Amino acid sequence: MRYIEKYTTEPKAFSRWKKQNKTAGWNDFSGGTEYGEVKEQLIAEQLGMCCYCEVLISLDACHIEHLQPKSVYPQNMFAYENLLVSCNQKGSCGRKKGKWYSSALVSPLDQDCEKRFTYTLDGRIIPSDKEDVSAFETIEKLGLNCSQLKDRRRSIIIMMDNHGNGPEPNYLQTVTAGILQREKAWPFGFYTVLLFLAELYEIPIP
């Protein structure tokens, strides 16, 4: 799970819409052009990756996710700091999370969230600390070890393996820099899997 640093301001069109539609519901908003603008900015914040699993997403292959579900926390329905974008995989992430939310959720808005998880060489995501109950629950509730995600992470690890010697340092550094700069040369996402490999093979990442 990659840490997401929210922009300091929401899209101006979104602010105007909220002022003009103070009694509107989410369905009123999701059908308008402002919805697309908010989505685009959220995707930019997340470097083009799903807020939970880090798979690459596009404007048409994701949905706006409420960290605190709008049906449970209606007061935060239009709070920009509560909005993320999630992939549309049914067995994981926002679709699986549904209305669940608790203090146990490790949020991608927590600055230390990346430190709470690590990976195994077969592609599973696991808590960095075996005693971290919240990390275990987050993995379960978000379906982060569903077969599709595990297999995709494993394929990246195998691809970077370099005949058992680990990733080529210059290439790994170039790839991670490319993700941060939103370049299109790396079509796989899963930024923290690359950080895991860098740490495993003691490759410094700028």
Image: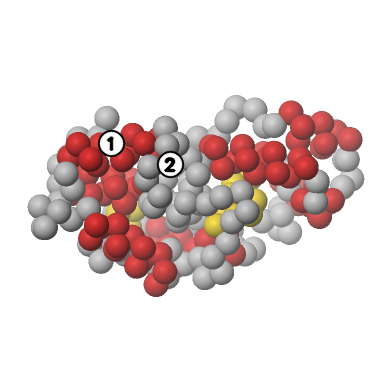
In the displayed structure, does residue 8 sit left or right of residue 32?
left
Q: Is residue 74 visible?
A: yes
Q: Which mark is residue 110?
A: none
Type of the residue with mark 1: Thr
Q: Can you tell which quarter of the image residue 15 is in?
A: top right
Pointer 2 or 1: first along the chain: 1
What residue sits 11% from the left and 58% below the top?
163
Q: Can you tell which quarter of the image residue 195 is in?
A: top left
Q: Position of residue 13 (x, y in %)?
A: 77, 32
User: Can you say whether 196 is above or below 17 in the image?
Assistant: below
Residue located beneath label 2 in the image? 184
Cα–Cα gap, marks 2 and 1: 12 Å
Residue located beneath label 1 in the image? 174
Q: Secondary structure at mark 1?
A: helix
What residue sits 50% from the left and 35% below the top?
5
User: Can you say whether 96 is above or below 105 in the image?
Assistant: below
User: Can you say whether 205 is above or below 60 in the image?
Assistant: above
Q: Position of residue 194 (x, y in %)?
A: 29, 47
Q: Give the camera-side residue of 39 and 73.
A: 39
Q: Position of residue 151 (x, y in %)?
A: 34, 67
Q: Are marks 2 and 1 in contact (CB under 8 Å)?
A: no
Type of the residue with mark 2: Lys
Quarter that holds the C terminus: top left
In the displayed structure, does residue 33 sit left or right of residue 64?
right
Number of numbered discs: 2
Q: Position of residue 47 (x, y in %)?
A: 48, 40
Q: Secondary structure at mark 2?
A: loop
- For the residue carrying disc 2, how many other residues have a C-alpha within 10 Å: few (<14), some (14-19), or many (20+)? few
